[in-house]
Image (cartoon, helix red, strand yellow):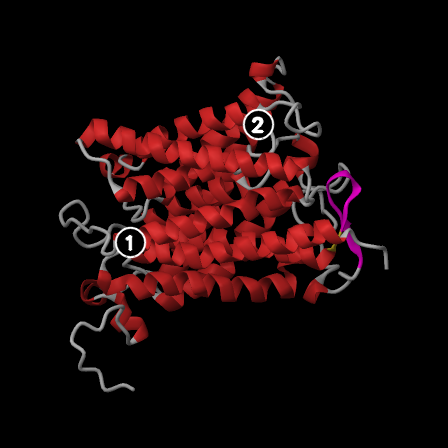
Amino acid sequence: MIDVNTGDTAWVLASAALVLFMTPGLAVFYGGMVRAKSALNMMMMSFAAMGVTTIIWVLYGYSLAFGKSNGGLIGNFDHIGLSNTLDQVTGAEGHQIPVLAFAMFQLTFAIITVALLSGAIADRAKYGSWVVFVAVWITLVYLPIAHWAFATQGGNGGWIIDKLGALDFAGGTVVEINSGAAALALALVLGKRDGFKRDPMRPHNMPLVLLGAGMLWFGWFGFNSGSALSAGSLAATAMINTQISTAAAAMTWIAYEKKRDGKATTLGVASGAIAGAVAITPACGYLNPMGALVLGLIAGVASAWAVTRKYKFGYDDSLDVVGVHGVGGLIGMLFIGLAATVTANAAGKDGLFFSGGTGLLQSQIIAIVAVATFSFCATWLIATVISKTIGFRAFRDDELNGLDTTYHAESAYDITGNSNRY
């Protein structure tokens, strides 16, 4: 076996653990945002994503996402069951890390991406149908897009990264725009919650929301900095840029709220932090710190405005996946075309503001449109087939009574104290 770089390997393994931690963080974040009667169901949807996606990743997911490319569209079956993975994968600047470390790191990206979609259909999806959806969506939507944007193979890998030349450091297309477009399709297929725009549907536990946001913020350092695949200056750039953008967006979101409504809310500061982290995800390895600050300031306001559009256009994206992840990812990808600089990353490109011309911006736009279109159409088709066959929308009585007792025979809070179960 080839010697591995133990420092870089340790960094990637630690980053993988941080990103995996984000999914329980998402469960807490989402669980606090829904009504009490469906809090456990919301959290269980994230844990189902962890279980199903891991099984698929071992069986064929990693192979199709990162195996030898077939025309830049999808990998092959060389790594079925994670076979032939005892070699090493080359990271940035020739650093050597085990393939299994890289596979584990990328698995956590797949998990969090599909888990994000549950927020668009909170309070109204059949749990069993969600489990089926996760398996099909990872296979037909996530794996191809991951190959397009992440599978660099010396110019012969995924078409976005190796042929188009678009830049996406840590998942603006694969995770953010993909989840935003898919969330919109899911919300449209399943329809509105009973009482949408009539009942308040407020978050039932704001301390949980803030705790979950903090867990996500913490895990995002692994998400972005770990994508450098080495414990060096590029990882440090990605980390500081992540902190800057996340903090800036949290502040501009509540500033926007204060101007609009006269109050700065805890939900706003939590949502703003996520919006800033989303926006910097594709750009963290290509911007200087001032660029990250500007991006965060923009992302907070833009996403705060975007989440209100669901009421205008009449789609029920329950927990604002479209407005935060879709719009945030869009802004981050576009900002690369404007403000990327080789002073931050010599392997990157200069954007329009640094005399790089419009070529990079054009590539970014093509990547955005391609991923959003494919994700929306494929997700709409998958969700429609599930709805027409086994059914995807929960029965109205179950929705009104709460999905916790219906699907899990439990409740988040035992307020009576009369349970004889144990």
Quadrant of residue 2 within the rendered picture: bottom right
Cβ–Cβ below 8 Å for labels 1 and 2? Answer: no
- Judging by the rendered image, the residue that carries numbered circle 2 is 287
Label tally = 2
Considering only vertical position in the picture, is 68 above or below 298?
Answer: below
Quadrant of residue 132 within the rendered picture: bottom left
Would residue 4 be found to the left or right of residue 412 on screen? right
**Mark nearer the viewer, 1 or 2:** 1
* Whole-percent x, y for residue 130 in the image: 40, 62
Residue 329 shows up from this direction: no
Q: Quadrant of the N terminus?
A: bottom right
Judging depth in this view, the residue of 53 and 282 nearest the camera is: 282
* Whole-percent x, y for residue 192 in the image: 25, 50
Specify the amino acid type for callout 1. Answer: Pro
Considering only vertical position in the picture, is 396 above or below 298?
Answer: below
* Circle 1 residues within 10 Å: few <14, some 14–19, many ≥20: some
- Judging by the rendered image, the residue that carries numbered circle 1 is 207
Specify the amino acid type for callout 2. Answer: Leu
Q: CA distance from mark 1 to mark 2?
A: 33 Å
Q: Quadrant of the C terminus?
A: bottom left
Name the residue at 56% across, 39% down: 239
* Whole-percent x, y for residue 214 in the image: 40, 49
Residue farthest left in this picture: 198
Residue 351 shows up from this direction: yes
Quadrant of residue 168 within the rendered picture: top right
- Under tag 1, what secondary structure? helix
- Under tag 2, what secondary structure? loop
Considering only vertical position in the picture, is 116 above or below 389?
Answer: above
Name the residue at 31% across, 46% down: 317
Magenta residue span: 87-96
